[in-house]
Structure formats: C-alpha cells, structure tokens
Image (cartoon, rainbow, N blue to C red):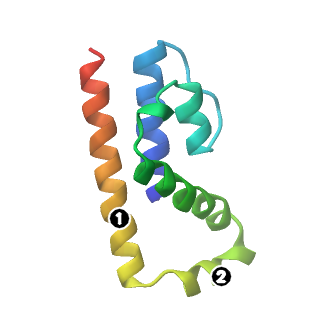
C-alpha cells in the first residue's frame, strides 16, 4: 500500500504540473521523470523510490510474498511508513504550489 500512496500523489502532481492524464504505469521514477519533477527530488527521496518500487511488483505475485515477509519486520515497516508519509507530504506541498 505504501507504493500506491506515492504512486497516487505522484500522478496527482503529474496532472497538476502538466494538465494531462498521467501514464498508466506504476514505476515511481518514471512518473516523476515524465512529470518533470524527478530533478526536484533530493537524493534521499530518489533512493527511497528505488527501495519502494520493487515492493509493489513483488507484493502482486504470491511467490514473492514469503520473501517479502522475511525482509520486512516491524522496524523496517515503520521506517518505510515514515518515509512514505514524508514523501507524500512533500508532494502534496508541491501540488499546492502549482495552484
């Protein structure tokens, strides 16, 4: 779900910037690049996209769920959640500046 939160706010930001329907894609870095806001992300945010993106793909397929379960514990999940919350807020603030 964390991936989807960022995907949706990125698509909202894409629409706010370009006044177009965003591409029907799930790759977060691609959405940011096509929306022309990738360069406004800092290095930490870009690195986080690299961590978050594979989780969406792996969560969709049952054979990957066991591997995800082993890699994610309470502390890792809490950290992911906090980073998602920060990136979501950053994106919402950027969207409000486009109005």
Who's the residue at 40% across and 19% down the image? 16
The label shown at residue 20 is: none
- Of the 4 image quadrants, the one containing the C terminus is top left
Q: Is residue 15 left or right of residue 89?
A: right
Q: Is residue 30 left or right of residue 52?
A: right
Q: Is residue 31 left or right of residue 48?
A: right
The percent coordinates of residue 8 (x first, y second) are: 45, 40
Secondary structure of the residue carrying tag 2 is helix
Who's the residue at 65% across and 82% down the image? 67
Label whose residue precedes the other's in the sequence (1 or 2): 2
The percent coordinates of residue 39 (x first, y second) are: 48, 32
Q: Indicate whether 13 appears above or below 85.
A: above
Who's the residue at 59% across and 26% down the image? 34
Task: State the residue lying farthest toward the right.
Answer: 63
The percent coordinates of residue 22 (x first, y second) are: 56, 25
Q: How many marks?
A: 2
Q: CA distance from mark 1 to mark 2?
A: 19 Å
Q: Residue 63 lies in what quarter of the image? A: bottom right
Q: Indicate whether 79 appears above or below 67.
A: above
Q: Indicate whether 7 appears above or below 19.
A: below
The percent coordinates of residue 79 (x first, y second) are: 35, 71
Secondary structure of the residue carrying tag 1 is helix
Judge the density around disc 2: few (<14), some (14-19), many (≥20) Cα neighbours within 10 Å: few
Depth check: give the residue in front, 40 or 73: 40
Q: What residue is pinned by disc 1? A: 81
* Marks 1 & 2, CB-CB < 8 Å contact: no
Q: What residue is pinned by disc 2? A: 67
Who's the residue at 58% across and 64% down the image? 55
């Amino acid at each position: 779900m964390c991936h989807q939160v960022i995907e949706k706010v990125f698509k909202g930001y894409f629409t706010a910037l370009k006044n177009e329907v965003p591409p029907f894609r799930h790759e977060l870095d691609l959405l940011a690049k096509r929306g022309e806001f990738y360069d406004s992300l800092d290095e930490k945010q870009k690195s986080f996209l690299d961590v978050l993106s594979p989780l969406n793909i792996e969560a969709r397929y049952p054979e990957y769920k066991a591997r995800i379960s082993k890699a994610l514990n309470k502390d890792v999940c809490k950290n992911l959640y906090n980073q998602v919350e920060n990136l979501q807020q950053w994106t919402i603030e950027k969207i409000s500046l486009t109005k």
